[in-house]
Image (cartoon, rainbow, N blue to C red):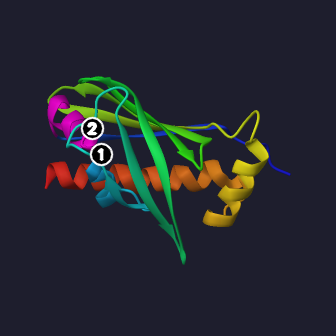
Amino acid sequence: MMNRLWKVEESVLVDAPVAEVYSAVADVRNLGKWSPECFAVWSRGRGAGTGSAFVGFNRKGLFVWFTTCRVTRAERPDEFAFRVTAFGLPVALWGYRFRPEGDATRVTEYWEDLRTGPGARVAEFLGRVFTGTRPVDRAEVNRSGMRTTLGRIRAALEG
């Protein structure tokens, strides 16, 4: 059996200023356009400050589910992150770091699996039921999704 990865990250260089890239990513409604799994976001506003909440609507194959998210970092223009829960159970931490490289921006997306401690078995079971992904495969599935998301972010901001 493979060793399970609990954290992964991917990055891409976007030919756009760091403030513009941060603003686009911190407008959480854009996640539905860029993510291969999240198809819509309900939020009360465009940007999200630390502590604000939003709901992500996700789809994989025939399965559709929602997650509740709370912004944990909104440090313009350096980092934006949020915690994801489902049915009150911790699921993951997703985030983005932004670093200027000349006139461009290095965007790093990171993910940490939070399905540990009390409720972890239920969260693992729900994750497997809704996504069809085994826990040991989750990091690589998310890494692939990150590459898609980052590519779509780059295309949107460079196009």
The magenta segment is: 16-28
Q: Mark 2 touching mark 1, by CB under 8 A?
A: yes
Residue identifier under label 1: 28
Residue pictured at 69% horizontal, 49% vertical: 123
Q: Quadrant of residue 156?
A: bottom left
The answer to whether 63 is drawn above or below residue 52 in the figure is below
Residue 22 inside the magenta-drawn segment: yes
Image location of residue 13, percent across then percent down: 29, 39
**Residue 89 point in image, percent of width and height:** 63, 43
Q: Quadrant of the C terminus?
A: bottom left
Residue located 62% across and 48% down the image: 139
Mark 1 Cα shell of 10 Å, populated few (<14), some (14-19), many (≥20): many
Amino acid found under the numbered disc labelled 1: Val
Kindly give the residue lying farthest to the right in the view shown. 1
| Label drawn at residue 26 | 2
What SS does tag 2 mark? helix
Could you say whether the residue bearing mark 1 is in a helix, strand or loop?
Answer: helix
